[in-house]
Amino acid sequence: MKIEPRPAVSRRSVLLGAAAAIAAGALPAPVRAAPEQTRFAAIVIGTGFGGVVAAARLGAAGVDTLVLERGRSYDHDDHAAVYAAGTDVLHPNALWEPALGRTGVLDVEVAGTVGVARGAAVGGGSVVYHGATVPPHPKYYDKVFRHGPRYPELIGEYVPRAVRRLRAAAIPDDVRCSRPFAAMVEFEQSMARAGWSCASLLSTVNWDVVRRELRGEVRPSMTAGEIVFGNSNGSKRELGGTYLRTALGSGSVRLRTLQRVTGLSQERGRVAVHAEELDAAGRVLRRRTYTCDELYLGAGAWGSTELLLNSRLAGGLTRLNEHVGTRVGDNGNQFSARLVGRPLELQAAPIVTSAFVDDDPHHLPVRVETAGLPLPLPLISYFTETVDWENRTSWTTVGGRAALIVAPAAITRDAGAANARILRRVTDANGGIALDPLPGAPVGGPVPGFGTSSNALPLSFTAHPLGGVPIGLATDDTGRLHGHPAIRVVDGALNPGNACGANPSLVITAFAEYVMDRAREAA
């Protein structure tokens, strides 16, 4: 055996080394060179509605936690357009496409015949959604949700807790009567003429900031139709200012942004999280591996499912069961609109009112809502969340990678018909011509309005992808992955494809609270 000679050690080098060590010990902590921490008790992936709940609960328990977010963080400003304004898709803060040098807030994916929009920023979907905070409908809850909390527990404990921590509230009367909300009032009137009454919804809009917009004290955002690229003045309560602020204030949770997680693996009883750190232009700066005892997946229904499936394909998570990638739905999202004789002016953006329509045995029940657009168009929108417990699809594999490819009408057939029925009846009651779909056949009536429905079009669009890791099937009833119990899912992937007549943010938040109660009990 060859022994390498050791370098000679002189008395002078020993003294110099000792002096250097003493000097280093006297330096302030930030000056010392320390290895970067990569091992944590818990890691949370994503800062959307599920991930921030996990982070806040881990912080409250004093658990050493790292939160990884692929997007950037933004600071609100009363007068500057921090986010992309209006419909400016070319703004660097608008779209997420790192391959094209973009790390904006909105990620748009194409899944066969369905376009999918999701958030890509600190706060996840709360940055790009319309603020509606709606519980699932009690009549159909058991048809959709076969596992997880039962409705009395959900509505008695977890929904109130989520509403309180999201700081959601109904639109105040003085704001409702303001000019930017005139189209919302017209929507309610058109629904009433069709025989359906609307009621106010809870919303995460910051109504005090909206009042400041109306008084001209801050740059108009919410009242100018801005919402899908974020509200620069803070007129929408993002998760960064509610749950995540609580988590980071605990002292035991830290956040790292522009961390794109590429894979997961099991290593000696711990979970390894492999990530790429990006710069603001989407370039990969370095690759890291973090390890943890507990992993909480909050990357969204699309992100969490894709990550798990690709990790299995790569050999990192070999014990996932056959239900991962299944029960995928679009929450029954469909869109129609009536062009009407109203002024060409911007409309307020948030969803703050709705009617639940359940009076026709030949069509699925739907929640009907309206939202303003950042363009001065003479139209009223009719956006529907269909209660659908049947139409689902699954992920597949293409070229050795996980892929979601939705066949034509695979998940939209019944939802589209329900939406078209709403348009026809509203048109019959209010006048106009309804096209279903473009360029469908006209439905008779006077001509103060002209309606179009997305029903049966070859392409559809959803901002509410759900499912992929259904609770009770891919996981146990507490969100813990079968085969990999150190991993819990806390986001919309747990949802079996539909939020039961609701915009899903509140359902996701409430379910995450339910999962975290049981995770901390088991700790």
Image: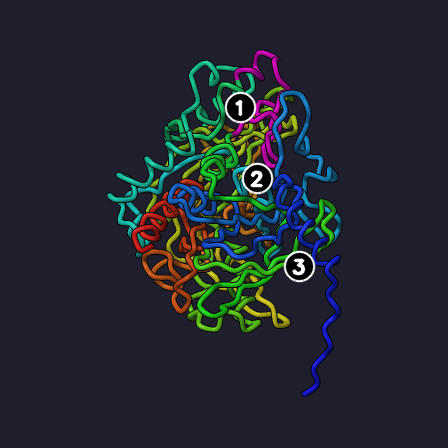
Distance of label 2 from label 1 (alpha carbons): 17 Å
Which segment is the magenta one? Answer: 211-236
At 44% from the left and 41% from the top, the residue drawn is 505
- The amino acid on which the numbered mark 1 sits, given as a three-letter code, is Ala
Residue under circle 2? 452
* Frontmost residue, 471 versus 268: 268
Most prominent secondary structure in the magenta stretch? loop
Mark 2 near mark 3, Cβ–Cβ under 8 Å? no
At 54% from the left and 55% from the top, the residue drawn is 303
Q: Which mark is residue 287?
A: 3
Distance of label 3 from label 1 (alpha carbons): 49 Å
Q: Secondary structure at mark 1?
A: helix
- The amino acid on which the numbered mark 2 sits, given as a three-letter code, is Thr
Residue under circle 1? 183
The image quadrant that residue 218 belongs to is top right
Residue 87 image point, x, y percent:
68, 34
User: Which residue is the extreme one toward the front?
Assistant: 11
